[in-house]
Image: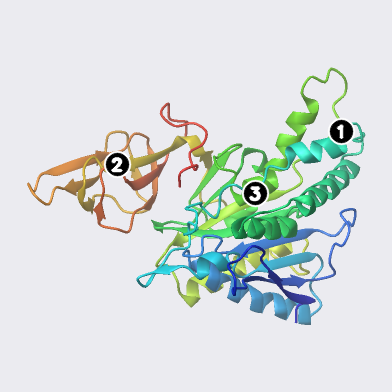
Amino acid sequence: MPLTTEDILLDHGFPGTHRAVTVHRFGPARTDASAPRPKAYIQAALHADEIPGLLVAQHLLARLKAADAEGRVRGDIILVPYANPIGLSQAVLGTAIGRFALSSGVNFNRDFPDLAAPVADQVLGRLGPDAAANVVLVRRAALAAIAAWETATEADSLRKILMGLAIDADLVLDLHCDSEALVHAYTGTESWPDATDVMAELGCRAVFLALESGGNPFDEACSGLWWRLRNRLTAGLSGAVPPLPAACLAATIELRGRRDVDDALAAADADALVRVLTRRGLLAGDAGAAPAPACQATPLAGVDRVRAPVAGVVLYTVALGDTVTVGQTVAEVVDPVTGIRHPARARAPGIVWARAEQRYTAAGAIITSIAGDRPLAEEGSGLLTAR
């Protein structure tokens, strides 16, 4: 059984309501940021209507319980099998609405706190030549900054709980899914190529890199602290710069599409996560050599979000996994009044990794996504802000 299983209550709920996040912790907890034990944090369904991760978490939970019973847990592993009790409770006319808070319209995976400024205030002038000691100092400051955050909404209370559990972890994996998609992932530019084995184990067909993806999502709030803090602390310095590595590898893992929910897929994904945890020293055992990557990482700003030219019925002319060229028609949108077919064309060459499951679209809606290998002039930073 887990060392601890805890239900953490959210603050600021409506009268008569109580929501909680369930937390499973395996292994001796890293109770102090200076402890050398590796720490991993994995959560599912922060976007609560993205279901594959919920099933993967249950398969992973069973495997971690078995590993714990066999004495194979070597690090601090935290598993949050559902990261968003607010979103899980939202439904409109039988349809789950878990991406946005119905009370405010805010995306649950945006607006996590940027801790660089408060952490910088605490560590300024205290960092030295020892990189490991600097990591400990920053982690302590980050935990203190989260603890001091005074929240005013239930959604922010949730953000505080999740960040408090994850901010001092070496590895943070946030399990999501897309509409219809291949397995793909988002991570920080500074986390590459360190994340190569994680993405290869999970079979990612696309990996997107950015320092600022837009809106400060959960994974970026955890890993981005390190490079934002370094930039803040070293700005204007003329002497030696204290070493400050990117000590948290955080990634958003997109487990295919919304309908890809079955035991076989979930079991395979959980097995892949166990191999990741084993290879990174959190579980005892032999994970074997990491598989060859299934893709090359590309810039998030190179993603071609192909939009519908008009409203109408979507007919895809390419499949997930197809490689397309610039100008190639990837879909046709049929005007239901005139019957005219309007082509939607690729602006970038690359693999088609996601598309919309709805076959009727509004004009300007994203219908297909292509992994371009270089930034598009029309894009840039903030690509995820509105999504």
Q: Which residue is tagged 2?
A: 364
Please report contact status of discs 1 and 2: CB closer than 8 Å, yes or no: no
Hey, which residue is sitting farthest front in the picture? 15
Q: Given the image, on which type of amino acid does mark 1 rest? A: Leu
Q: Nearer the viewer, residue 91 or 260?
A: 91
Of callouts 1 and 2, the N-terminal one = 1
C-alpha distance separating marks 1 and 3 = 29 Å
Q: Which residue is tagged 1?
A: 124
Of callouts 1 and 3, the N-terminal one = 1
Residue displayed at 75% across by 66% down? 77
Of callouts 3 and 2, the N-terminal one = 3
Colour setup of the view? rainbow
Q: Picture quarter containing residue 126?
A: top right
C-alpha distance separating marks 3 and 2 = 34 Å
Instruction: Check residue 195 in the rendering and tell me which mark sits there, or answer none.
Output: 3
Residue displayed at 66% across by 50% down? 250
Residue displayed at 25% across by 57% down? 359
The location of residue 188, given as percent across then percent down, is 62, 42
